[in-house]
Image (tube, rainbow, N blue to C red):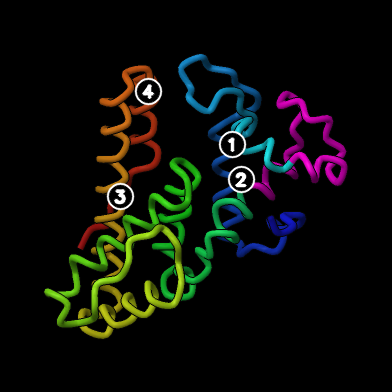
Amino acid sequence: MMNPINTYQESPSFVQDFINHTISLEGDYVNDEDDRGGETRFGITYHTAKKYLPYAEDYDWDGDMKTLPIALAQDIYAYEYYSRPKINLIAEKSELLAKEVFDSAVNMGATTPIKFFQRLLNVFNNKQSYYKDIVVDGYLGHNTMSAYSKLCAKRGDASVENVFYNALNAMQCVRYIDIAEGNHSQESFVWGWIANRVDYVPF
């Protein structure tokens, strides 16, 4: 794993703003028996935080979730859900879509919204006349972003951005419903997920 230290400080301002907003919504320490992530602080789960125990000394952290430093939480958000999955590649094309993919990544892991993004590219290529189908693997790279650029060339940047934003939010919403239907304990959270994280832009 690459070094996550100072990832937050090195991130774009919109990433920092989103992280701070997320932390304000998530609050401090929570240990809800219905939460599949177990203990959380600032919205960071124990499962995620323990991967960063090798850096605990750098943050003066004793490993207890109740004392997870906010600086470490900020760096985890920036590294785990923006820098490592290369969402900056989307930000180079559209800050709006980067925000949306980042938002979903925080809530359901980075590969899931990237797969949403790739699936949309594959159904918007007009039977592969605009570009060839790409592999839906949850990883951002040249093929994914090249396909996006080709779609923009055909449909126009603003049109693609708006359609993608709404479609990504729709897929995110359905994913939340699937989670709650598959595990009824998650019904405790699905209302808040949809109310706070699903949004649309008008045309």
Q: Secondary structure at mark 2?
A: helix
Label 3 – label 4 distance at C-alpha = 19 Å
- What residue is pinned by disc 2? 20
- Nearer to us of marks 4 and 2 is 4
- What residue is pinned by disc 3? 169
In this view, the residue in front, 194 or 110, is 110
Q: Is 81 placed left or right of 139 in the picture?
A: right
Label 3 – label 2 distance at C-alpha = 21 Å
Give residue 6's quadrant in the image: bottom right
Q: Earlier in the sequence, mark 3 or mark 1?
A: 1
Q: Are marks 2 and 1 in contact (CB under 8 Å)?
A: yes
Q: Secondary structure at mark 4?
A: helix
- What residue is pinned by disc 1? 24
Residue 41 bears which disc, if any?
Answer: none
Label 2 – label 1 distance at C-alpha = 6 Å
- Residue type (three-letter) at the residue carrying disc 1: Ser
Answer whether residue 66 is magenta in the image: yes
Q: Which stretch is magenta? A: 53-76
The answer to whether 129 is drawn above or below residue 194 in the figure is below
| Residue at image point 24% right, 78% down | 132
Give residue 54's quadrant in the image: top right
Looking at the picture, how far across and down is residue 80, in whole percent? 59, 51
Label 4 – label 2 distance at C-alpha = 25 Å
| Residue at image point 60% right, 29% down | 27
| Residue at image point 57% right, 57% down | 15
- Residue type (three-letter) at the residue carrying disc 2: Asn
Residue 186 bears which disc, if any?
Answer: 4
Answer whether residue 97 is magenta in the image: no
Q: Earlier in the sequence, mark 3 or mark 4?
A: 3
- Residue type (three-letter) at the residue carrying disc 3: Asn
Looking at the picture, how far across and down is residue 203, in whole percent? 20, 63
The answer to whether 19 is drawn above or below residue 34 in the figure is below
